[in-house]
Image (cartoon, coloured by chain):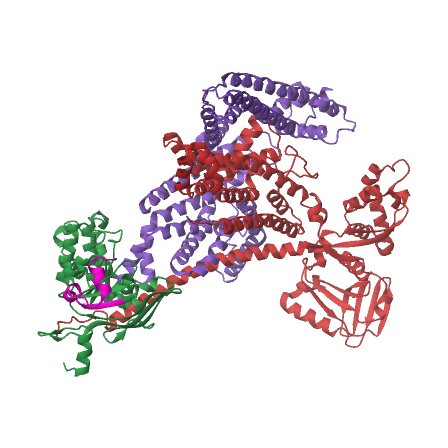
Amino acid sequence: METTMTESREMSAAGIKMDETQGLTFPRIDCRNIDVFYGDKQAIFDISLPVPDRSVTALIGPSGCGKSTFLRCLNRMNDTIESCKVTGEIIMDGENINDPGMDPVLLRSRVGMVFQKPNPFPKSIYDNIAYGPRIHGLAASREDLDAMVEKSLRRAGLWDEVKDRLTSPANSLSGGQQQRLCIARAIAVRPEVILMDEPCSALDPVATARIEELIDELRKRYCIVIVTHSMQQAARVSQRTAFFHLGELVEMGETDQIFTNPRERRTEDYITGRFG
Amino acid sequence: MTDVAPDPFRNEKALRRLKKRRAADARFRLYGLSAIAFALLALSVLVASIGFQAISAATYHKLRFDIVLDPAVIAPKGNDTPAEISRNVDGFYTLIRSNLEATFPEADEDRMASRQLGELVTRLAVLPTAKWVAENPTQIGQTATIKVPLNDDLDLYLKGAVSKEFRLRLGDISAVAETAPRQVLLTGAGAFKALESLIAVQRQEVGDAVDARSTLVSSGTAMGRVTSLSTDTLEMTLLTGSASDFRTGRPMARMIALPESQRNVSDLQIAWTLALKDMGRISRVPHTSLLTHTDSTYPELAGALAAIVGSLLTMMVTAFIAIPIGIFASVYLEEFAPRNRLTEIIEVNINNLAAVPSIVFGLLGAAVFLGFFGLPRSAPLVGGLVLALLTLPTIIIASRAALKSVPPSIRAAALGVGASKMQSVFHHVLPVAGPGIFTGAILGMARALGETAPLLLIGMVAFVADVPTGPTDESTALPVLVYSWSTNAERAWEPMTAAVIVILLLFLVTMNGIVVLLRRRFERRW
Amino acid sequence: MVQQLGLLPMGWLMLALLAMLASGGFFVGRVQAERFSGAGAARTHSRPNYHGYYVAMWTFVPALIVALGYGLLGDGIVRSMLASELPANFTDMPRVELDVYLNSVARAAYHHGYTGADRVFSAIMNRFLELQGLVKVATIGLALVCAAGGFLLARRRVAPEFRARNRVEGGIEIFLFLCAAIAIATTIGIVASLLYESLRFFAEVPFWDFLFGTRWNAQTSAEFGALPLFFGTFMIALIAMLIAAPVGLFAAIYLSEYAGPKVRGWVKPILEILAGIPTVVYGFFALLVVAPAIRSVAIWINTTLISAGLASEPLLAAQPTSALAAGLVMGIMVIPFVSSLSDDVINAVPQTLRDAAYAMGATKSETVKHVVLPAALPGIIASLLLAVSRAIGETMIVVMAAGQRARISADPTADLTTITVQIVALLTGETEFDSPKTLSAFALGLVLFVITLFFNLIALRVVQKYREKYD
């Protein structure tokens, strides 16, 4: 891959890291000048953020800073809120996913999402995982589907715990298991990107630790964007961190750099616990 | 570079599948839209059909008479007290009758015609005149202008509701000859071409049935029925007026689609009515008697006054019982009731009572209030009691919701300054919940106002000719009047019934309007 | 003189009397309490007003009980006293006719007097007034005596340390409880009266003959097989639900999942109008518009089939009133009952479940079909059950548009009759109250009550459970 000097300078300014083994990692998703409005109120102000592949990007910031709203732009979940309007470009695989011509159904099958509270469907464990492949017609046969379910559950580290009770209702699982089930459900559609909206905020420390392990495992295959309230979590799981404040992107960079040597005063204040 | 799996979403098959899913989505949305469209359509057809009928009943035709109030007829010696004059329907009707006979002397010729002439005005229609004269005895012997309602069938005919009618102007008439008594021959070059072709067209449509139809030709106040027809000549039997009336102007022909044998108004009556209209004696006026008269067996004389008053009396009884008891019961259940089995039973009970069919309450009323307590049948008191029991659950449920929405902080504040539980509820909680409770009470009343079935079972379906004055008088109610009028056979009752429905709906709209206003005014969020 | 007393306006008189007693009692109690609280000799528990309320309560309540007793029983007592004095040809009269006669007596007595020539009527009217006078005077006397008793009892207890406020509030609480208990009393009244009259009916007509007999002819001959009525009721309710269930459900889905706030703001109130229209109006609509339309369509089908050679005689009954007309209009009436409750339960399904489905790439309809509806299913079933119960108990539409003929026929254009139609037919008009014919109405009412109770209880339980789940 060849890049001109100007391009590479721009990229390093944006914090894109050159990887020795794989060469340059292009941003998997490149967000340019995103504004979000709820009715008359503007929630996000002109955010541009490249998201690299095969790594975890953490979005941090105080409550109401717009990090969840931004996350929901990446798979057009904001379409389900009537008053919400998103402008700007979100480029993924050379396509603007914010384009009205983009089919959100197709998009969401490529960009999976895990929510704050575990939200399994009121169905069996098996049916929860199989739901995505079924509606998208991914499985050719019953055996195929079984294999997909097993693979997803294995990747989510849940297989050994539930393999004997795939037909019992998903609601019978514990909170942490339910959340891993939701991750498995998202994986089953074979997405390229996984969005996680504070996936551990409803869980106890032990369950949280397991999910974090899982995220670390998953980053080898997927591009992951995670919104989190906990700075420790961001430091533990992410490679890159973006700090949001009042709807603006204050700073982004390597996680190590953000936490040890922030460039902005506001970032430092937040990280050291002076507000937020 | 990377082990990119073949993208499962970017192949021909997946895109075809997506298209199908999109189509299914659109179809599902369409089902929803059509469900709503169906409901809205049903509502508009209902409103339109009733509104259309009611508009037809908003006005009616009255026939004017300028007559001398002959004392020998209306107040003969020995029967001339005001009370007797006001009951002297025969006398007043005789005056009207002889006036009509003078106007249409041909009715004397046979008894059928004479009887038909009498049907133009119902005998009892003179009752208001009789009352008016009894109150103003100086009018006796004077010439008075009185207006009486036209017979309901003729009223419908004038409103165009009896039958389809084809009308056209004939050409110029060059000669009129009376070939025999009441047989008239009209001649005019090509004058009847249009009428001839109308009949030909109709014959194509309905076949020989067209021969059973009446074709009437009129000029001024005269009218005849066509017996034979060619392009240049027309023969007819004169129904009213004289042949000479056809010498001037271009006569009007009308073909009535419904044969005479199948309608309640005869050709002769139509001829007379149109003649009277031509004389300017028939006018279409607002149907005020609908609000000022009580029930009658004649549609043109009937009104809803007794039912309106009966409904108001019933509602008063219901409101006096159901609203206070409903409020007190909800206060008890929401604020005081200990959580035990008994209150649980009461709660299940109330929820269930709200869904018990209303007719069961009617059975309760018949068995307990009429049978056991021996209260009078057909009385607003009993109707009100039954409807009170019927609306009580509704009011309790609404009031409890209102009380529930009062934040506990208000109760805590009142208790905190040393008020007793009772004081905190009656001084602080109830006033805050007031608008919500009131709203529920009005909605309950609105439901009670429209109830019919329980009132039928306690006999409030009786024919009531007097306006009730108290809650124990024999009485009926608006929705029951709708029912009893709609079961009458005569066509004229249909628009009348629709008009009563409109009155009933106006009451309901007003009540619901108050609710909407209250909600707007007092809506608050804690 | 006694006759004049018969014209006493008891309602106003009792109101005035009760007001007087209450204010008098309050005044006496208060003055008495002020005497010791003013002196400051002892610390009083309650403020003087409460002592006043206490005495007022004890004076007012006994008199109120007497007044209520008069209101409920007074007229009945007078009438039965009068009836027992009437000559034999009156006592032989059927109950309803006697009632009508006594109504006219009462009307004459209270309003315009009687100047006609019927001497018997005149005498009965005078005796009626005398009896009224007697009962009224006795009531007033009894009320006064009771009030005085209560008053004396309460006055003796007024003392500085007497906890008047607690007693008054206790009294009010009892009163509030009695108000709430009226709901129970109503149910007991319904069950008792239906059971009592039904048992009398089943003493004459065997229970199983009633339930499974196929010939119903209560008006003319004594045939009480109610099966055709049950059939008609369920047939019409079925037609209604075939309309209301899909329309109501899809309307609810559209409104809660697809429609924007503006559309919702307009359509929801309009749908609720359908629920606010009195059923007698629907009945008129069915009679005026729907039944004739269905009849002409049925006739058209008949003639087309015959002219096409597919049938040799009319296939459909094409009656002027028909099960289809009644069922169709009832379906329209029931739509809002289905849609509004379904809308509630669909809205109660948590948004996170929808988000989960959308995030997997499900379309809107897939989200609704696979996630929202299964989650809302119990609530939707409850709403359908309540709607069925409403359709079974609905009276006016079927009375006006279904017909009177008891028969079992699957032809929807034939006229059928229902339980409610027969109850109305049996109990309106001047019928004898004690014949099996009238009593059968109560047996039908009992069946109706039991069926609807069954549906309601299940539905209410399901709704209750559902609320607990998502609250």
Q: Is residue C314 in sight in this rendering? A: yes
Residue C194, given in percent of the width and then of the height, sits at 49, 31
> Position of B297 compared to B102: left or right?
left
| Residue C324 seen by the camera | no
- Image coordinates for residue A152, horizontal then vertical, percent: 16, 59
Which portion, as a residue range, is magenta? A249-276
Q: Is residue B5 magenta?
A: no
Indicate whether B204 appears above or below C392. Answer: below
Q: Quadrant of the N terminus of chain C?
A: top right
Find chain A in the image and tell me its colour: green
Using residue C225 as the reference point, say whether residue A211 is left or right of it.
left
Pick the residue in front: B421 or B6. B421
Numbered-mark total: 0
Chain drawn in red: B
Q: Residue at x 83, y 66 (%)?
A: B184
Relative height, residue C370 to residue C448 (above, below): below
Tell me the residue at 35%/61% (across/down): A81
Q: Nearer the viewer, residue A158 or B430?
A: B430
Tell me the shade of chain C.
Answer: purple
Is residue C301 positioned above or below C398 on the image? Answer: below
**Residue with the most extreme left position:** A21
Work out which residue is located at the far front of the displayed protein and give it.
Answer: C40
Compared across the picture, whether C396 is left or right of C88 comes to: left
Q: Residue B285: x and y, percent?
A: 73, 55
Residue A265 is inside the magenta segment: yes
- Residue C253, position as x, y percentages in the image: 39, 56
Q: Name the residue nearer the viewer: C213 or B379.
A: B379
